Amino acid sequence: MKLFGTMNVNDKGHLEIGKCDTTELAKEFGTPLYVVDEDLVRNTCREFKNNFEIEGIESEVIYASKAFLNLAIAKVICEEGLSLDVVSGGELYTALKANFPASRIYMHGNNKTESELTMAIEEGIGRIVVDNRNELEVIEYLCKSLNKKIDVLLRVNPGIEAHTHEYIQTSKNDSKFGESIFDEDMCRIINRFKNSESVNLKGFHCHIGSQIFEEKSFYSEVSDMIKFLEKIKNECGFCTEELNLGGGFGVYYSEGDKPVNLKSCLKNMISILKEEAQKSGLNIKKVMIEPGRSIIANAGTTLYKVGGTKKTYGGKKYVFIDGGMTDNPRTALYDAKYEALVANKVNVENNEEYTIGGKCCESGDIIIKEIELPRVERGDIIAVLTTGAYNYSMSSNYNRIPKPAVVFVKEGEAKIAVKRETYEDIIRNDILF
Ligand code: LLP
């Protein structure tokens, strides 16, 4: 069991985050509740920025907002000087509403709609990451009709099989993302970009997957990309200015997880890049990375209230919480593992094995399959750790359950970042005809 950031156990034996007693947070804001440790987010942003500095080359850390996005986090990310990756009109809209500078926004997606692309072009975002040759046609046509020119990167797929869950591997040869670096038509594709009057191809983007523990996968990514850039320089006469290496740095969720050591991993990526780029005679001007999970995962905790417990005929002991797969679909989707504690009994000995089950009408609605906890009673507060990434952003209203509130905690102060949904919100778009 690992505590993160500002987590602490106070004199009452309660879990504290950002100097706020989590049992008090549960009382004040209700449950389920997403709690974000603002200092931990800021410190992690700084860790990325400080360790991803390359002498003689511009570097940029881009937060992959799909992991967790709302106005408040966009503001924090902006203040910390990171850029932002968006993959939809909704993410772009949120960023712009938070006054995130358009020039620091990158737009991804394998099937951006015309209206999403129009919004991106009109707002003058920093870069569109073009997924494939066919998307270029659409972007060109839109740029022409809007009388604009835009800087782009082309997403390529280096075919690296990083060891992670199959659903979050993104770089295999049959991936739906990007053009393969092995594509025989690569020069023809690049020439199409070079000859375009609407787009300015600055370089390439790649991303090898998510929740990757093996640092050597990132090193192979850098080497393989440099080899690719050298090849297209020699064979297609294209000099790459910018290289975006994506995200994917694995984090600790539960025992056995060996998170990437950011400092050494980033430093090694940089030195491999510098050395190999130099050998290949490449003149790369800017390098980017795009972490999402590693910035926000450990900074998020979900608080639930226990409604009751139950021992089945088969002998399994359940703890029932007032949320579930609606606020955290990751266990059901990826068999994700989490650690949790009873926030009001942190110092009490763990002597029971439980399964933590949600309240949705689905047997798969389990958050943790087996966990040792102290004896749990109705009214206890369960804190599930490392729920900052891809939980709120993948939450749903299954069973018409309103989405929880999000609070940011820091130095004893708790600020609402997203209000709890109400039943009114649930029927907001329904029409009774
Ligand atoms: N850049 C691109 C182009 C991506 O596709 C992703 C994640 C990232 C950056 C950020 O990756 P990260 O640093 O967060 O690993 N829903 C899944 C994760 C899907 C990740 C999709 N792409 C989950 O809950 O584990």
Image: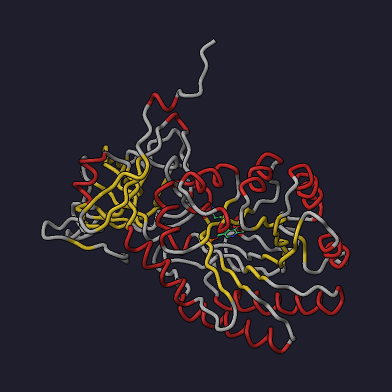
**Horizontally, is 30 left or right of 326 in the view?**
left
The answer to whether residue 192 is left or right of residue 149 is right
- In the image, residue 164 sits, relative to residue 360, either above or below, namely below
- Residue 433: tell me if it is visible: yes
Outermost front residue: 147
Residue 315 seen anywhere in this rendered image of the structure? no
The image shows residue 104, relative to residue 112, as above or below, that is: below
Horizontal and vertical percent position of residue 76:
40, 56
Q: Position of residue 289 (x, y in %)?
A: 57, 68
User: Depth check: 148 or 276 in front?
Assistant: 148
Q: Write down the quadrant of residue 270 in the picture.
A: bottom right
Q: Nearer the viewer, residue 44 or 300?
A: 44
Q: x%, y% of residue 338?
A: 40, 57
**Residue furthest out toward the left:** 11
- Image quadrant holding the N terminus, namely bottom left
Q: Is residue 175 left or right of residue 47?
A: right
User: How many numbered callouts?
Assistant: 0
Image quadrant of ligand 1?
Answer: bottom right
Above or below for 279 versus 135: below
Q: Residue at x 87, y 76 (%)?
A: 235
